[in-house]
Amino acid sequence: MDEYNDEMEIELEINGVLDLHAFSPKDVKYLVPDYLAECHARNILEVRIIHGKGIGNLRRTVHSLLEKNNIVKGFRLAGEDRGNWGATIVELIHRECERENQK
C-alpha cells in the first residue's frame, strides 16, 4: 500500500480490524475506504476501526468517511469490551444486496 506512504510499503492483514495508530492522519481518507473494500471483497462484513479516544478528530474523520461509503450498512462506537469510544464497529452490506441495488 505504498500510495499511503512514499517512504515505505506497509502490508496490512485483512482480518476485520484496522488500527489507525500506525498511520498518518493524512492517509486515513484513502486507507479506510480501501480497507473496507478489501474486507467486503473477502466477505468480512463486520470491521472494527481503532481510532483512539483522544480529542475525537480522527473519530470524526472516520465517521465522515463511513457516512459517504456505499458499502457501509451502518456503524456505531464499540462496546466496552471492544474499545469503547476509541473504536468504531462498521457493518458492511452483503455483496448480494449490493448487486440487487445496482439493478
Image: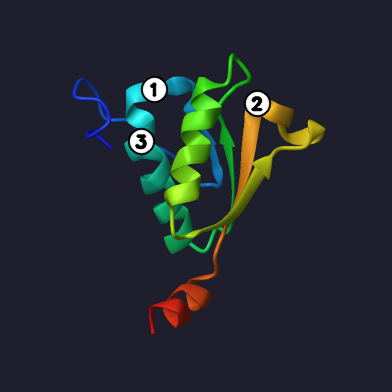
Q: Residue at x 51, y 21 (%)?
A: 57
Task: Say what secondary structure mark 3 lies in.
Answer: helix
Q: Earlier in the sequence, mark 2 or mark 1?
A: 1
Tell me the CA gap for discs 2 and 3: 18 Å
Q: Is residue 70 visible?
A: yes
Toward which corner of the image does residue 74 lie, by quadrant?
A: bottom right
Q: Nearer the viewer, residue 6 or 69?
A: 69
Left or right: residue 24 versus residue 46 is left
Question: Where does label 1 land, which residue?
Answer: 25
Report the disc number at residue 80: none
Front residue of this view, candidates 3 and 13: 3
Q: Earlier in the sequence, mark 2 or mark 3?
A: 3
Q: Residues within 10 Å of mark 1 (few under 14, many from 20)?
A: some
Check disc 2: other Cα within 10 Å, few if <14, some if 14-19, many if 20+: some
Residue at the extreme bottom:
103
Residue 29: which disc?
3
| Quadrant for the N terminus in the image | top left
The residue shown at (46%, 31%) is: 61
Amino acid under label 1? Pro
Residue placed most toward the observer, 15 or 87: 87
The residues bearing labels 1 and 3 have C-alpha atoms spaced at a distance of 8 Å
> What amino acid does circle 2 point to?
Gly
Q: Which residue is mark 2?
A: 86
Quarter occupied by residue 83 = top right
Q: Quadrant of residue 10?
A: top left
Expressed as whole percent of the image width and height from the top left, the position of residue 93 reads: 54, 65
Residue 94, position as x, y percentages in the image: 54, 69
Residue 69, horizontal then vertical, whole percent: 43, 53
